[in-house]
Amino acid sequence: MAELSHFLDGARVPGTSGRTADVFDPAAGSVRDTVPLASREEVEAAISSAQAAQPAWAAMNPQRRARVLLKFVELAHQNMDELARLLSSEHGKTIPDAKGDWQRGLEVVEFCAGAPHLLKGEHSTGVGTGIDVYSIRQPLGVVAAITPFNFPAMIPLWKIGPALAAGNAVVLKPSERDPSVPLRIAELFIEAGLPAGVLNVVNGDKDAVDTLLEDPRVEALGFVGSTPIAHYIYETAAKHGKRAQCFGGAKNHMIVMPDADLDQAADALIGAGYGSAGERCMAISVAVPVGEETADALVAKLKERIAGLTVGHSFDEKADFGPLVTPQAKQRVLDYIQIGVDEGAELAHDGRDLVVEGLEDGFFVGPVLFDRVTPDMRIYTEEIFGPVLSVVRAADYEEALRLPSEHEYGNGVAIFTRDGDTARDFTTRVDTGMVGVNVPIPVPIAYYTFGGWKASGFGDLNQHGPDAFRFYTKTKTVTQTWPTGIREGASFVIPTMS
Ligand code: NAD
């Protein structure tokens, strides 16, 4: 067992606060490492280092900054097997899924290599006699990223990529549950040519986050995690006059229309419901078949497929999904299953008694399927974040459309149908940020933006895509005119464009 570190000024540094948290091997169910929890002074040192490094990084032309990003992508691909294994060993997702976690992050970094184009401003010439107006995008300075455990590569990279490309320095406070991947990211950036101090990583908990929120040198915070913390960070950042984008929890529905290909829909639900043990913000946790006939047929197909699923060690090539991240995460999911039973939902498949041979202490929960769930149940209203799929039967299309639209969360939603008119009506009217048509997990690609609505997102600019460059820059607008006006003497009347 080792004590992990922080990453400051281009190197790993041990913690000095004397406080640590356990990092688990979720498959074995044992503690594999401890992670230091930063004190206020340690976070302040990371901010000072970032502040000192930022001006030179911002002064480097954007094409050179982009080259550092592209070199980072190349190094990550060269080391992909090791990086995916590291991620999988702390998180518990399978190796192919861990590679996907990296890949979706690297795609955003690749997109950010377009910074020279994305940072272009606007220019209007001759807006008045001899007057030009143009806008330029300038970096904010030091920005902070606070990220969740469930995508330890992808989400830090969604923040770091655009922030660095735009000329900012970043202090990353990753999840204390799987901190090794973010530390490796920082190390690889140094190898790629990033100057020391431009990206620092502080491990920690609420104390570290509060320091980032309160320190006036931090200009903006990008957060991803659960809704109560997202709301807290949004609120506190605003109180301190900081820019914030805060993405929260989810309860993603998948509508299955009677005309859908039910085999395709069932396969999609199995992957999107149980992949990564349901620990994805875009996981489908609610299936909404329309009509009793569709529901009966879909539930039968789901039960058949669930019986064939393999749960095992994340390194096991045969495993469809692995363990949950911590003993607390496992207990939380078990508690919700009991709540569902007590609330009267029909437990169509119970995964609670699953035991993985040789890994009896691992944080495994098998796939769980609830049928006849109703909108007043807590297993419907609250995010479970585990391998639990609920079936809510809808009588018709309008009822199915109302369910995700009226839910507190509004991250992702999908509809499975062969009818273009239904799909078009659904995508127009549903009150949710990201929509899939026959696509169960509609995570937008890097050059579009990612963001949920309602309790799934606070702030007004999304992650990655062009929005990220708006978030990580401030616009300066210049109005200029050249000498003739001056030659004619001072004017005491407010300039107008007439
Ligand atoms: P979490 O809210 O527990 O933690 C997220 C981050 O906040 C971590 O870095 C953590 O250290 C920090 N934190 C925790 N408690 C804090 C407190 N009291 N004050 C300040 N900071 C605190 O989330 P998690 O369990 O790591 O991640 C899972 C959650 O993230 C789920 O709700 C999931 O839906 C959500 N998520 C959302 C998206 C999205 O884009 N909407 C993406 C991934 C995950």
Image (tube, rainbow, N blue to C red):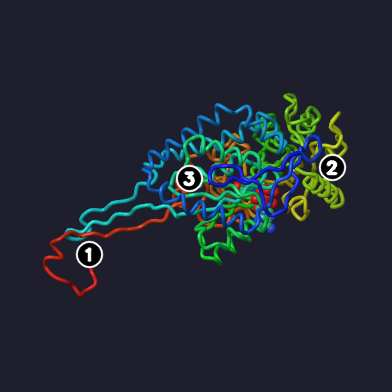
Picture residue at 74% right of the left edge, 35% below the top: 298
Give the percent coordinates (x, y) of residue 295: 75, 39
Tag 2 near tag 3, CB within 8 Å: no
Q: CA distance from mark 2 to mark 3?
A: 44 Å
Kind of residue at badge 2: Leu
In this view, 497 is above or below 471 = below
Kind of residue at badge 1: Met
Say the numbered circle drawn on residue 352.
none
Q: Is residue 483 left or right of residue 140?
A: left
SS assignment at label 3: helix
Q: Give the mark nearer the N terminus: 2 vs 1.
A: 2
Given this view, does label 2 or label 1 mark the residue nearer the observer?
1
Q: CA distance from mark 3 to mark 1?
A: 36 Å
Q: Give the mark nearer the N terminus: 2 vs 3.
A: 3
Q: Is residue 142 visible from the viewing direction of this image?
A: yes
Q: Is residue 196 left or right of residue 97?
A: left
Say the numbered circle drawn on residue 347.
2
Picture residue at 23% right of the left edge, 56% below the top: 132
Given this view, does label 2 or label 3 mark the residue nearer the observer?
3
Kind of residue at badge 3: Pro
Give the percent coordinates (x, y) of residue 479: 27, 60
Q: Which residue is mark 3?
A: 162
Q: Residues within 10 Å of mark 3 (few under 14, many from 20)?
A: many
Given this view, does label 3 or label 1 mark the residue nearer the observer?
3
Viewer-side residue, 141 vs 16: 16
Q: Give the mark nearer the N terminus: 3 vs 1.
A: 3
Q: Residues within 10 Å of mark 2 (few under 14, many from 20)?
A: some
Q: CA distance from mark 2 to mark 1?
A: 70 Å
SS assignment at label 1: loop
SS assignment at label 2: strand
Q: Which residue is mark 1?
A: 497
Viewer-side residue, 476 vs 295: 476
